[in-house]
Image (tube, coloured by chain):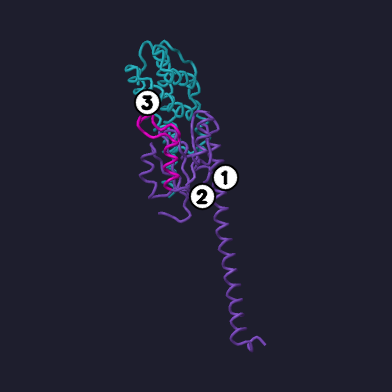
Chain colours: A purple, B cyan
Amino acid sequence: MNNKNQINIFIVEDNKVFTLAMKADIETAFPKMLIKIHSFETGEKCMEKFMQVMPEIVILDYHLNSKYPEAADGIKVLDWIKKANYKTEVIMLTRDDNIDIALKSFKHGALDYIVKTETKFRKINYSLFNFFKIMEARRETKIYKFIVIAICLFVAIVVGIATAIQIFSPSLLK
Amino acid sequence: MKATESENNIQLSEPVCDFRYLIDIVNGKTYLISGIMDVFLKQVPEDIQCINEAITNTDYKTIKSYTHTMKSSVSIMGISILMPVLMEMENLGIAETDIEKIKQLNLKLKVICVQAIDEIKKEKLNYNHAILKKTINKNSKS
């Protein structure tokens, strides 16, 4: 079932234990949200499904070549994602507290950069929580935009009708 | 996975796993804990096998990759005793040096993993019992 309000999250991580734990943690942290999590071991496998699902957010590990030595690294996959859909947000994950990778990630369009310390899952949930808030704000902005446009159109129509009446049969307004 | 004689020289007196972190992240849901343990029990022996092969072939790149990825798995199971071992192996892998030291650390890694797997298997049995009990209760109610 593909619901309109469903949020699709992609996890790209080559460690199955970590992926499963992260999936369980996210589902436990946001029980009321309609979330569907898809997991992939490499960026290449993720991109095969990307255009079909168009996920709202991707949690992407930087090191993806433990089992597949030729697999692209996180920055390369981040570029592919942003090229395919710049609106998809990316949270970069890594075990290295490396400022160069962090800066590179932000430069390439990552929303957040999380180091896999003991509090990693809390940090991921916090980042997701912020993202959901941004999504909600965007949705509300869209609704307000629509309301303002509708009011403007209504006023324009009323003014138009009044002007037309004044021009063509001014006696009606007397 | 069984420990060899030289591996048995490394003695472990206390439990190596601490499941509190795992229980916390899944909010105590038994079926999730059991599922994650299943994947761990399948993945870790494969990772160790790959590290063994990499050591035989003096393939530092693979040693680095697998020790790096294993750190995530062992942190979920709270095997903190393994972290410095894996970190040292990874650093030696990055530096592409001292295969003899890597071999020594690998022995320690294997012994700790054998014990961890044993503890996880025992713990998993408890969760399986809990799941079974829940299912029986559910069925008897309906």
Dot 3 and dot 2 residues touching (CB under 8 Å): no
- The percent position of residue A127, horizontal first and vertical second, equals 55, 41
Disc 3 versus disc 1: nearer the observer: 1
> Residue drawn 41% across and 54% down?
A2
Image coordinates for residue B92, horizontal then vertical, percent: 44, 17
Label 2: chain letter: A
| Amino acid type at image mark 3 | Asp
What chain does badge 3 belong to?
A: B
Are both tags, 2 and 1, on one chain?
A: yes
User: Based on the displayed image, in which of its 4 quarters is residue B39 positioned?
Assistant: top left
Distance from label 2 to label 1 (Cα)? 14 Å
Please name the amino acid that badge 1 sits on: Asn
* Residue type at numbered disc 2: Met
Q: Which residues are magenta?
A: A61-84
Q: Would you place residue A4 above or below residue A160 in this image? A: above
Residue bearing mark 1 = A130
Nearest the viewer among B77 and A68 is: A68
Residue B79 seen in the figure: yes
In the rendered structure, find residue A33 and report the number of the disc placed on it.
2
- For disc 2, the neighbor class at 10 Å (few under 14, some 14 to 19, many from 20) is few
Residue located beneath label 3 in the image: B47
